[in-house]
Amino acid sequence: MNYNPKNPDWISRDRFVLSNGHACAMQYSMLHLCGYEVSIDDLKQFRKAGSLCPGHPENFVTPGIEVSTGPLGQGLTNAVGLCIAEANLGQNFNKPGFAVMDHFTYVICGDGCLQEGVTSEASSLAGHLGLGKLVLLYDDNKITIDGSTDLSFTEDVGKRYEAYNWHVQTVDDINDLGAMCAAIEAAQKETDRPSMIKIRTKIGHGSTKEGSHKVHGSPLGAEALAQYKKDMGLDPEKSFYVPDDVKAHYGSTITEGQKKEDTWNKMFAGYQAKYPELAKEFTRRVKGELPEGWEDALPVYKVGDAAKATRQWSQMCLESLAAKVPDLIGGSADLTPSNLTGVMGGDFQKDTQGNRYLRFGVREHAMSAICNGIAAHSQMLVPFCATFLNFMGYATGASRLSALSQFGVLYVMTHDSIGLGEDGPTHQPVEMIAWLRCMPNMMVFRPCDGNEVSGCYAAALNSRKAPSTLCFSRSGMPIQEGSSIENVQMGAYTLFELANKACGEASPKKAKADGDLPDIVVVSTGCELQIAVAGAKELEGVKVRIVSMPCWELFEQQSKEYKLSVFPAGVPVLSVEASCSMTWDRYSHLHVGVDRYGMSGPYKDVFARFGISPENVAAQAKNLLAFYEKAPAPSLIARPTTTFVVKDH
């Protein structure tokens, strides 16, 4: 492999992924031997709190770890994304004699990874795309936690992968290193297909527990370990030491790694001289900087512009950004005509890997995990993926790892409520937004109009260390007075205030000075904001503040003073969103929403049946005002929200 232990982020390094992450003690040991910043003392802290050697690999903790693996199958699927990134960047930057992006991705996986459905999805796509620089070493030891794979897994894996259009080889004995090397060299030459090397191994080889599933997740134990060391010619009394001959064998890795990077740097200097503009673009993207002035591509709208569904405004925004930000790459899980994401130019296919639109097929889970791999490759690409919001549930395992791993993946999720209508409750997300908002380090956006859509994309593209879920509607809505790209960055803001008929005014106006408080705040998101406004206008004699809250996470970053300026202490708050009430008690005293599964029918009829209507908004506002008629509403902002602090890695 090509790598430099003293610069784990060298852009042209080969990538290595341990998909079966429970074997990470081996990986940490290898990182130590090869000269990465993982010491013997770090190895001694394996699985201890705050250690550089956690119980499964974490990319943001340990030098040399590319992706966070643990949930089986994620690593192999991430590797498909790593290969897509390498292929795309190579097509766009490489020139004759200057292979500035040219590396392999190596993966080790076990039986468990190949039983997970996500690897089937990803491997099928990898074969279709002809990702020839992907080399998979399959540890075929026929053991899982339950015991022998004969209990549940007797398929011919090699034939399955041949059907996926993979190059498949078999090494019958892991101890035959000559056969191993020959197989890897053959895989490296197979440039048109990904490669699997199926390697027959024995778990716990050489120990008294050889072949037992008891070795899978447990140490050998003192007695078995001592016997093993003795049989291998090692001192059974010594622990955490490296014999001199092993040190000597690995001693050159740092020097050789630096030579490889130096050779690449020299080549890149020649590239800069011959292709200065390409080299400048390459360097910008390595740094993770977006193109200068990219924000100018964000569309801006005014009151009176045509009403649209936010998925349509998303399409217009993506199209503008695609022309300005070549870093963007992504696609849809076979819902391009519905997600409206097919605006990236040509498709990334086997013969057109320089293009930026990915046809993921009906593979939501793999789509998400592949995008994690693209993000893990480097900051040179900004991946996005799209489906219906309800099917984010199919991508749960990988989207959670986006947040954990600090990958800035953009999840473009359309059909975001019961407002999608006739498809019925199987397609209507009622709990998904609440679930996503509960996920640490996940930005969740639900814009109310075109300006907020642009603002959400602005915030998402600036969020390189956290993924973003952008929730877009199927149903239409007008441009709201007071909406803007800038206001979205605050998370929540006052759109306008209504002083209704008996108060002397019927039209919207800007918020009054501090001290002149509204009688009630009505806060909403997405398509329902227009319904909230219509309901507020029916409250005769009531001063109503209309608040749009496109992103809770951004609002949480604001000062207490700003939060109180939006939600004043003592003023009751009514929230309106076509999703479950759980979590809305954080920001409102009463919620107009949906706490059961939806139903099939025209969206306006479905909304009316569930009380997502101006009439019900007005009625619930009156109920809330009556409840707090004799006492001020308790402040939802002026209260502690953090009950404990954990020291990070």
Image (cartoon, rainbow, N blue to C red):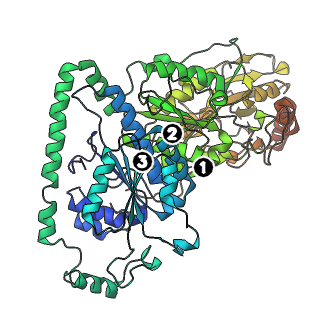
> Badge 2 is on which residue?
557
Q: Is residue 518 left or right of residue 201?
A: right
Any mark on residue 79, and which? Answer: 3
Real-space Cα separation, disc 2 to disc 3, in angstroms: 34 Å
Q: Give residue 142's position: percent from left, percent from top.
A: 47, 70
Compared across the picture, whether 202 is left or right of 431 comes to: left
Whether tag 1 and tag 2 are in contact, CB under 8 A, the answer is no
- In primary-sequence order, the first of circles 2 and 3 is 3
Residue 347 appears in view: yes
Residue lying at 42% horizontally and 78% vertically, measured from the top left? 211
Residue 541 in the image: state x and y as whole percent.
84, 25
Which numbered disc covers residue 31?
A: none
Would you place residue 41 above or below residue 593 in this image?
Answer: below
Amino acid type, label 3: Ala
Q: Which residue is mark 1?
A: 438
> In this rendering, which labeled residue sits more in front, label 1 or label 3?
3
Q: Which tag, 1 or 2, sits closer to the chain's start? A: 1
Q: Nearer the viewer, residue 35 or 615?
A: 35
**280 is higher (above) or lower (below) than 248:** above
State whether residue 221 is above or below residue 151.
Answer: below
Q: Secondary structure at mark 2?
A: loop
Question: Label 1 amino acid?
Answer: Cys
Of residues 341 and 584, the one nearer the viewer is 341
The disc, 1 or 3, on the residue closer to the chain's N-terminal end is: 3
Left/right of residue 12 with respect to residue 233 in the rendered view? right
Distance from label 1 to label 3 (Cα)? 28 Å
